Amino acid sequence: MGRFSVRSISLGLAAPVAALVFALLVCSLILAGTGHPPIDVLDQMVKSVQRPRTLVNSINSATTYYLSAVAVAIGFRMRLFNIGVDGQYRLAAMLAAAFAGSSFLSGMPSFVRILLTLIAAMAVGAIWAGIAGFLKVTRGVSEVISTIMLNAISTAIVAYLLNADRLAVKVAGSNNIGTATITEGGRVPGFAYTGSSSKIFGLIILAALVGFLYWFMLNRTRFGFDLKATGLSESAAVASGVNVKKMVLASMLISGAIAGLVGMPQLLGSSYSYALDFPAGLGFTGIAIALLGRNHPVGMAFAAFLWGVLDQSSNVLDISGVPKEIVVIMQGIIVLSVVIAYELVRRYRLKLEQRDVGRALGTTKTAAEVSA
């Protein structure tokens, strides 16, 4: 059992490590071909992470990326591809920001205001993702198509509400448009870090809690067992009494609820309003991180931090004269190579398991037995 455990861990780490090494090799060749010493560039990236401000910004980016990855991973566990996390979190962040900045919450205690804001964001995300789930279980519409279309619709809704001044106001001294500023009582204080003027998002605790609940749901509840069983074999799940349609709808609702939280660390910890410059594209980044982290809560945490470090390193490289697009190339190569690496590792693992079964049944002879 010990050897088997070591082998399992080794195979589990093989794919992401191989993907990272391959991405570094390809990017090194690109850098060398464009006249930038790869060792010097890597040294600059490592040194940038050691700076307090860069480290804090990397952790903050990782916090939002992690929530996005968990939202995507819930669907992946059931072979559902929630491509709509990007639209779900942006619509949720916009409406939650308008709600948090309204006079309705002004007289309430800070804890209540923050809690109601988070609940509102989760409700919007769940409803928006639930539309795709409802279409799938009632009309058989692919969740990939419906969520992509819902992304476009959510973008149009947010743009309409901002430009039509329904929920937004003009930011003084600029051409930016955003929701009313959330007052002090509706904000989440951050954690100070020595040497950095920026603070670590206070909602990093929420991200850690979401990761723990995700693990607990999958490994310690009947719902999580049914979810994984449905993802492995829908026909077997139906034979064991699992209501697949109910599982699909529930998974999309939960995925959307977590997607609604993606923008909350930035909204309540830094921006304090939803404006035209609010971070976009976090949903698609979550797909890459979920793949790299193999849908595991700990693996996705490391992948999210890696992505945050790469994003912050790109700014340092740009200042030093190295094209920051090299980081985007590296991220793209990581995503492509990790998919291929996982498939190769899966085939190799299957081959090893077949060999173990053959030996246990006495159908496979060792080299010593053959020579004897």
Image (tube, rainbow, N blue to C red):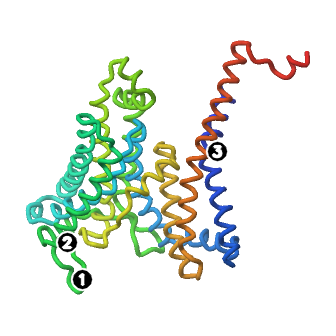
Furthest toward the right, the residue is 372
Name the residue at 32% across, 38% down. Answer: 251
Instruction: Give SS at disc 2.
Output: loop
Q: Are circles 1 and 2 on residues that touch, CB within 8 Å?
A: no
- Identify the residue position indicated by label 1 in the image: 175
Please say if 320 is above or below 251: below
- Identify the residue position indicated by label 2 in the image: 181
Q: Is residue 253 left or right of residue 294?
A: left
Name the residue at 42% across, 37% down. Answer: 77
Q: Is residue 54 left or right of residue 171?
A: right
- Identify the residue position indicated by label 3 in the image: 14
Instruction: Give SS at disc 3.
Output: helix
Looking at numbered disc 1 in the image, what kind of residue is underneath it? Asn
Q: Who comes first in sequence, dot 1 or dot 2? A: 1
Furthest toward the top, the residue is 362
Q: Is residue 196 left or right of residue 155?
A: right
Which of 150 and 88 lies nearest the eye of the viewer?
Answer: 150
Q: Tell which tag, 1 or 2, sits nearer the viewer.
A: 1
Instruction: Give SS at disc 1.
Output: loop
Please say if 102 is above or below 40: above
Whole-percent x, y for residue 358 in the image = 70, 18
Which of 156 and 288 lies nearest the eye of the viewer?
Answer: 156
Label 1 packing within 10 angstroms: few (<14), some (14-19), many (20+): few
Q: Are circles 3 and 2 on residues that touch, CB within 8 Å?
A: no
Q: Report the Cα–Cα distance between label 1 and label 3.
A: 49 Å
Quadrant showing the N terminus = top right
Q: Who comes first in sequence, dot 3 or dot 2? A: 3
